[in-house]
Amino acid sequence: MKNYRIGVDIGGTFTDIVLLDDDGNVISRKISSSVENYARAIVEGLESVFAEHGVAPREVAEIMHGTTVASNAILELAGARVGLVTSKGFRDVLELRNLRMPRLYDLTWEKPPPLVERYLRTVVDERVSAAGEVVRPLARDDAARAVRRLLDEGVEAIAVCLVNSYANPVHERVVAEVVRELAPDLPCCTSFDVLPEIKEYERTSTTVVNTYVLPIVERYLNTLRTGLDARDLRAPLLIMQSNGGLTPAAEAATKPVNIVESGPAAGVVGARAVARQSGLENVISFDMGGTTAKASLVERGEYTRTREYSVGGGIMTGSRLLTGGGYLLNVPAIDLAEVGAGGGSIVHIDTGGSMQVGPRSAGARPGPVCYGLGGTAPTVTDAGVALGHLNPSFLCAGELPINADASRRALEDTVARPLGLTLEHAAWGARQVAIANMIRAIRAVSSERGRDPRDYALFAFGGNGALFATGMAEELGMRTIVVPPAAGLFSAFGLLYAEIEHHYSRTVRRVLRDADPASIDAIYRDLEAQADAQLAADGFDTGHRACTRTAMLHYQGQIYELEVPVSTGRIDRAGLNALTESFGREHAHTYGHRAGAEEPVELVTAQVLGRGLGDRPRVPERLRLADRNAESGSRRAYFGRMHGWIDTPVVARAALGGGGEGPCIVEEYDSTCLVPPGVRATVDASGNLVLTRPDP
């Protein structure tokens, strides 16, 4: 009997399904997302794939899933009705925020509405010091009064965040007990369980977001589990976390704040794994789908993580230095920059008479005009059809018919004629505007982080990534582009590379040169014990559990921290000195300078990552994908004013063999790769399509 592992990724337009057996055979399917109930598309899609390929449900070993349910609930303000219990004097922390503004000179900008309205925020009279000492005890009657008031308002969940509870959670425990007594079935989240760290606004916001999306995520995962069970699919369901690790669905349902950026993370995990196989240590992953484009940095073979990001205040464009527009989360996440530019992004003319692309998207329904599903506004995909870059008859090996004439009419009527442009110039302009938008995401994770994109390869995937990769590389001066197999389904494919991971952290606040090494060692050992216990509960024996230590540090007085690895084993004075030096090097690498030896370095947060390890690699080195490419041939394609229209060969990836020079179009089931004139294309030993631009 075969064993299959399944990766399922939900996007704004398509749901991608990938099945992988023990021998490296890959079965893939791309279907439209069922926006009204995402679980339905997954269950029905799997059922269809099983029937077509003769896969029995009992042959499935595990199902990995990347989901946008949590982020959608925040973006659409469709989460639970949440009540907040906080300390007296801290009722308005959610609205005061941290004074960061996404647009410095926009006097009309308004903060997003708090996820908990003021009348649903109650206070209790208590106080714990920053050292964890109880200064003013919490009366149980006071906690009961605050909880009853929220219950009378009909809240669907309660968040608890008391000042300094990261140092001593005794009062939060009292409030949680009262909630269980008065409303046993009501979800309740305490900040010590969600984020036991310093910084009042960050901790409150993260706890509230966790509580806000918890009922939505729990209901979705239960619906999906029920649908799978009804088809006799009893395999474990693992959910991708924002940090790049998998977690059991039951754990994700209790801490959904860790899966808010679930979908985008999977592609970066896969990019790192495939790049490593190809001997590439430094790459910038670029994922362009139907709604958004995302970029992330893989450096020295490791993806970069951030400890803080915002969701829901509009997609971040331009500068990562201008934050504060959304709802802040302080949890580990792969460092991603995202812009509203995808195949479904609408091309329009703004009030100033300039062409714009996005951020509005046609989404899955009605989609681009060429899909024939009712869309009337031209999109980036319609521009690709008009330019001859995309198959003018069908996509997805014929499963998605295309109406090229409808695309051309929409672009002509909406953009070209009003701007006095020819159709091809309007469509090419839309492409260039989209490229300019997406480049901002790449710069946000590279040049704004002190990295030169020319020192990296561009790893392009997503349904549209390979179509735009060479244009972006040209603008950024990047010479090498890598397009992996199954590029259009690569986020689902990336799920197969991920491992189960659990992150634990605790605020420390110690100046390293004055700290007691034994006390810091004890903190790390306690965090490792928590990780070890959770991995044991997940079914991993002692030989298949591993823990990695990191630390968040800054020069004393700084507001923001940098993450630095911490060596295993007992922490002694030499270990703390080595940690100080490692931080200095990272500070110089990131900011271009470091302070002198006399400047005190402070350990702010201790962190431990626990990983569950398998007996063998998650994905075989050699993969065999079903050949579902369109027939080879040629078609006229437009390559800008310099080259104009060219009769361009349309080829399969395998046909490139030892390589050749563009122009050509590599057409596959799930994506299309545009190879402009002068760019060389080859296929490496791992099946990656490698494009090399000539030296400038």
Image: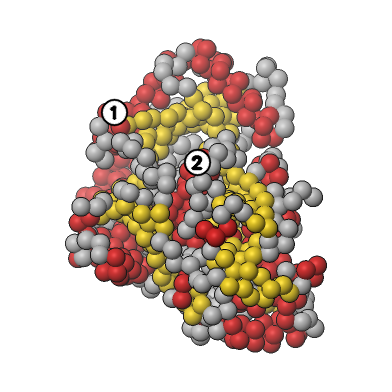
Q: Give me the residue at 56% from left, 16% from top.
A: 577
Q: Is residue 118 above or below residue 397?
A: above
Looking at the image, residue 61 lies above or below residue 615? below
For residue 2, say whether it is visible: yes
Q: Which residue is mark 2?
A: 277
Instruction: Give the secondary structure at mark 1.
Output: helix
Residue ID at (55%, 78%): 368
Residue 54, image quadrant: bottom left
| Residue 223 sits in quarter | bottom left
* Total labels drawn: 2
Residue 329, image x and y in percent? 49, 48
- Which amino acid, mark 2? Gln
**In the picture, residue 218 is in which quadrant?**
bottom left
Cα separation, mark 2 vs mark 1, equals 25 Å
Q: Is residue 474 above or below residue 638?
A: above
Report the side of 257 relative to 354 (left or right): left
Q: Earlier in the sequence, mark 2 or mark 1?
A: 2
Q: Residue 212, can we see it?
A: no
Residue 655 percent across, percent down from the top left: 55, 60
591 or 539: nearer the eye? 539
Residue type for callout 1: Gly
Taking depth in this image into account, of 97 and 401 the one nearest to the observer is 401
The residue singled out by tag 1 in the image is 543
Query: Closest to the observer: 471 or 109?
Result: 471
Comparing labels 2 and 1, the label whose residue is closer to the camera: 2
Q: Horizontal and vertical percent for residue 255?
A: 36, 49
Residue at 29 percent of width and 69 percent of height: 52
